[in-house]
Image (spheres, rainbow, N blue to C red):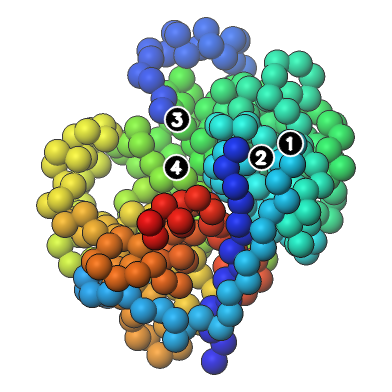
Amino acid sequence: MKYITFILILFTCGSCVSKVDKNKVNQKFGKIVKTELGDLDSTFQKLEGQGEIIPVDLKEDYLDISPLIDSVVLIPLEATDQSLIGNIDKIICTDDRFYILDKRTSKNLFVFDHQGKFIRCIGQAGRGPGEYLEPSDFVVYPKENLIIVFDQFGRQLLYYGTDGSFKQNVRLKYILSEIIPAFQDSLLFAVSGDNRHLEEIAKHDLLLINREGKVISKMLPYEYRLNFSHEYDYQQKDSLLLYHPTFSDKIYEISPQGIRTAYQVEIPKGLPSNFQERCQGDYQNFCNLFKQKYNYFSGGFFAIENYLLLSLITKNGKPIYSIYNKQTKEITAGVPAIHGGGRPFDIAGTIAYSLSNGFTVYEDYVVGNILFTGIYAYRG
């Protein structure tokens, strides 16, 4: 049986949406011609099935995952005046490159090779042509030598070559929070933001858009919107996308044929089905009503050939990692050493730290990152 292989990137460190009325939002976007925005009424096909049911274990014992790990590779990143990273928000790994996003500290998209050598930055912060207010998210199409950067505050998509050359930008008339490569290179999945100025898409979690920013279809409707979310709760592999909505007990699989439930997580004393309605989309209400009272699926997950890892939070506030063996249906669960309990920082703690600070899955590798000073601070 194949085990888990981790690639850990070592580096040294060098949004909320406000509530506004429709008129103010329209002033923000200027004149909106709905016919120019695409097919706002089209809904992505929902496929039948409840998915594989996983009764998770919430044991708070020490988690030892070393028997599940095949190997760990540590890659130090070259530190130059141009490559000082403040925080790693997102990693994309291709056949020969690491693309690393620091969206708020340095406001840069860095490119390194697989030996950790710095190559270049893509774009830069500013207000001129080819510049972004903030590189909020990005996707890479290696075969096309294309990188798309999403600038949330600038409400635009910017297109660059992998050599850093700027190609064009596309202005958006709606709000997004993330972009995800779709099953066709010409399309993108987009996590929708507060779009109350466009009722047709206002209450849907995901949009399918083309590269000109036009809406192809919408999916995952909701009645009560949350004004908070976890970032990057998805994983792409080939023509499939696994996606987890905020605090949901489901992971969905999206393919060209439609969207279906891939996994349904059974959580002991999990969130009530009407929790979104009861907290009215407000994070403080969520904390008052549900935090330290219920267990919930907090968001982080990865799926490889034989394993599915789920990151959960107990009502006691402890993070639990529950690892599901797809072949044997067994579950390994517990609290990694990084979270205390008198145990030394070990491989489980190292990996838990990396998974809470931006990671990706490439082929059958899990690629995470380690902040050098953070490890030593814990040991000290």
Q: Amino acid at mark 3?
A: Ser
Which dot marks residue 84?
2
The numbered mark, 4 or 1, whose residue comes first in the sequence reads 1
Q: Which residue is mark 4?
A: 205
State if disc 3 and disc 1 touch (CB < 8 Å). Answer: no
The x and y percentages for residue 368 are: 56, 60
Q: What is the secondary structure assignment of the residue under circle 4?
A: strand
Identity of the residue drawn at 46% across and 51% down: 374
Q: Amino acid at mark 2?
A: Leu
**Looking at the figure, which quarter contains the N terminus?**
bottom right
Measure how far apart labels 4 and 1 are at the Cα level. 39 Å
State if disc 1 and disc 4 touch (CB < 8 Å). Answer: no
The numbered mark, 4 or 3, whose residue comes first in the sequence reads 3
**Looking at the figure, which quarter contains the C terminus?**
bottom left
Q: Residues within 10 Å of mark 2 (few under 14, many from 20)?
A: many
Q: Amino acid at mark 4?
A: Asp
State if disc 2 and disc 1 touch (CB < 8 Å). Answer: yes
Identity of the residue drawn at 16% across and 46% down: 290
